[in-house]
Amino acid sequence: MPWRQLSLKVAAAQTEAVEDLLLEMGAVALTLEDASGQPLLEPGPGETPLWDRVHLHSLFEADTELALVAHQLGAAGFIDDPTSVVMKTVEDQAWERVWMDRFQPMRFGQRLWIYPRHHEAPESADDRIVRLDPGLAFGSGTHPTTAMCLRWLDGADLSGKVLVDYGCGSGVLAIAAALCGAEKVWCVDHDEQALIATRENAEVNGVLDRVVTCHPDELPAASADVVLANILAGILCKLSPRLMALLKPQAQLVMSGMLHAQADDVQRHYAEANLQWQRQQEEDWSLLVGQR
């Protein structure tokens, strides 16, 4: 059965109201995309991530009069440029499968891979394979900050070490750390959905016995050999006392999620830890590795 799709660009502040109106008029699915090329990373505590300007696609049943929908949007003041509204017919597909087929295996470093669950991985004693499908939580390895963290994990000696993944998202970094030899990984996140996704993904990858999930206020005052945080620069700055307190002698602090221009400021917030720093860069993003 074909569907009718109406697409338009809206300001972030209007998105919720536009969604409500579209649903009232019979939309069966809504998809939001960036309309301005703005990067979007993991949100801070209590924040709802959204681009400044959103490309909103709405899907309706085949007999829907999209001209009427567009008229209602215009009457409500949500259309400032009529040429930005696109109406078309789309053929029915197995949408989830189409989307999943675009997510292909990726290698990070020499031996670390991320494979979608529906892909068969080749047998290799040397490879460390994370089975992961994109989901509601952040982190599938496609963003440069996550990719840099994964490459660092692939090259690190984690055998028998305790690691804290602060802001675990999907759990991809924690699972990779466990597969790379970490004895225990504390996965910390304020978002319950992230903790659920991390536990489920850890179980799929056979490392649930080494992965412990908790909210930030539940993390025990324990020392860690490695503290890993792939979150926003502002949050990294605010968390500096918390993260430094988790580092034991000779520990490493690995931080990403910051733009190049933000890296110096983040590093300054950790001056009291007396760390020796190394920096890596990819595209517009930086990774900081501090060694005690």
Image (spheres, grey):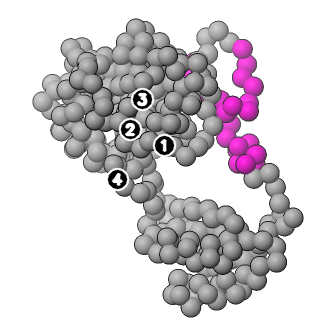
Q: Position of residue 163 (x, y in %)?
A: 37, 21
Q: Which amino acid does label 3 sit on?
A: Thr
What segment carries the magenta color?
96-123
Secondary element at image label 2:
loop
Marks 4 and 1 sit apart, C-alpha to C-alpha, by: 13 Å
Residue lying at 67% horizontally and 83% vertically, measured from the top left: 69
Secondary element at image label 4:
loop
Marks 4 and 3 sit apart, C-alpha to C-alpha, by: 19 Å
Quarter of the C terminus within the rendering: top left
Secondary element at image label 1:
helix
Write down the quadrant of residue 158 in the picture.
top left
Q: Position of residue 10 (x, y in %)?
A: 52, 74
Contact between marks 2 and 3 (CB within 8 A): the answer is yes
Packing grade of label 3 (10 A; few <14, some 14-19, many >=20) is: many
To which residue does mark 3 refer?
A: 213
Decide if residue 154 is in sight here. Answer: no
Decide if residue 245 is in sight here. Answer: yes
Q: What residue type is labelled 4?
A: Gly
Q: Sequence order check: which comes first, mark 2 or mark 3?
A: 2
Asked if residue 201 is among those painted magenta in the image, a careful observer would answer no
Q: In this view, does 68 lie above or below 152?
A: below
Q: Which amino acid does label 2 sit on?
A: Asp
Q: Where is residue 7 in the image (x, y as percent from the top left)?
A: 65, 73
Q: Sequence order check: which comes first, mark 4 or mark 1?
A: 4
- In the image, 188: left or right of 175? left
Picture disc at residue 189: 2
Picture disc at residue 193: 1
